[in-house]
Amino acid sequence: MYIVTGAAGFIGSCLTSYLNQQGINNLLLVDDFSRADKLRNLNHKQYLAWIHRDSFFGWLGANKVPIQGIFHLGARTDTSEQNTAIFDRLNLNYTKQVWQYCAQQQVPLVYASSAATYGLGKQGYTDSHDIVPHLRPLNPYGHSKNNFDAWALTQTQQPPFWYGLKFFNVYGPNEYHKGRMASVIWHAFKQIQQTQQMRLFRSHKPTVANGEQQRDFVYVKDVVQVCTWLMAQKAPSGLYNVGTGRAETFLNLTKATFAALQIAPNISFIDTPIDIRATYQYYTQANIQKLQNVGYTKPFHTITQGINDYVGSYLRQLRYY
């Protein structure tokens, strides 16, 4: 049996679908399952059972079944939330319990860290363990992820194999429920479809032209392949960046979305809101050398390939993966 936490969410539901495609249906799904819009992510998925996240550890204690691995993707991911207690409970302490179970029972673990741990990127974007104590995330969400990474690196009792995956800007199907926290591609699709135009944040740096702000956008189908590959290959444990290794401009992303919709580009710029301007990231790019060094050679979708698949196969039909 494999366990997927956060299974009704964006990446968790896509991972469940991908595991099903690989013929793996012996899954226990963990989440809070309280939102009908998220439950649609699990339609037509194959699994043994689901269980509420608050009952999960009791279930583990009562059911002595062989577990081949845990994909711990459940987390509070709202970067605008300022209540640190929520992140301490759901991201930090809950993940410590998952880790401790995996260490005691010798169960391999993949867990979601985040590129939000890098903050403004002053330490670069390398997944070296040495820089973890020096990282300065920009919000409580990023702090919670970095705090767990730092804790994990100090533990002498560990799962037999473990991987903390620093996801960069993930986009793709099954993010309909995320609203304002959905990817830029989802928002671009909605805005272009409704207004035939797209408004981007203006650059407030003289060295960066409008629309030339860059992010490493990674398609969710690539993300779930990395998750399952690491679990299957039993690569060396540690933190790994999961991005394409290519920074892409918002302008190119937007033009690709217009093209996927077969609409002529109509792009304008608005001021970046004052409350986020000082911490706005102008550049992120994953250093994926460590992942490549352990043998991961599958190509990542380019931004054009990913957007064409996302828009053409999912968004236009409101389909799920």
Image: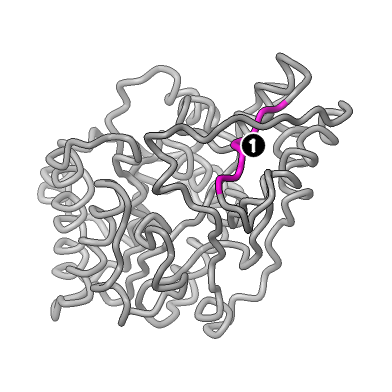
Q: Residues within 10 Å of mark 1 (few under 14, many from 20)?
A: many
**In the rendered image of this protein, does residue 94 appear above or below residue 86?**
below
- Residue type, mark 1 in image: Ile
Determine whether, in the image, residue 258 is placed left or right of residue 297.
right
Determine whether, in the image, residue 302 is placed left or right of residue 141.
right
Magenta part of the chain: 198-204
**In the rendered image of this protein, does residue 264 appear above or below residue 255?**
above
Determine whether, in the image, residue 123 is placed left or right of residue 229.
left
Residue at 55 percent across and 80 percent down: it is 289
Q: Identify residue for label 1.
A: 185
Residue at 72 percent across and 47 percent down: it is 306
Q: Is residue 238 magenta?
A: no
Q: Is residue 202 magenta?
A: yes
Residue at 54 percent across and 54 percent down: it is 282
Q: In terms of depth relative to the viewer, which is nearer, 125 or 320?
A: 125
Q: Secondary structure at mark 1?
A: helix
Task: Name the spot of residue 200 as percent of width and height, x first.
Answer: 64, 34
- Name the colour scheme: one colour
**Can residue 218 be seen?**
no
Looking at the rendering, in which quadrant would you find the N terminus? bottom left
Residue that lies at the very extreme toward the front in this rendered image: 206
Tell me where residue 321 sits by quadrant: top right
Task: Name the spot of residue 296 as percent of width and height, x first.
Answer: 59, 75
Tell me where residue 194 sits by quadrant: top right
Task: Name the spot of residue 139 as percent of width and height, x first.
Answer: 29, 47
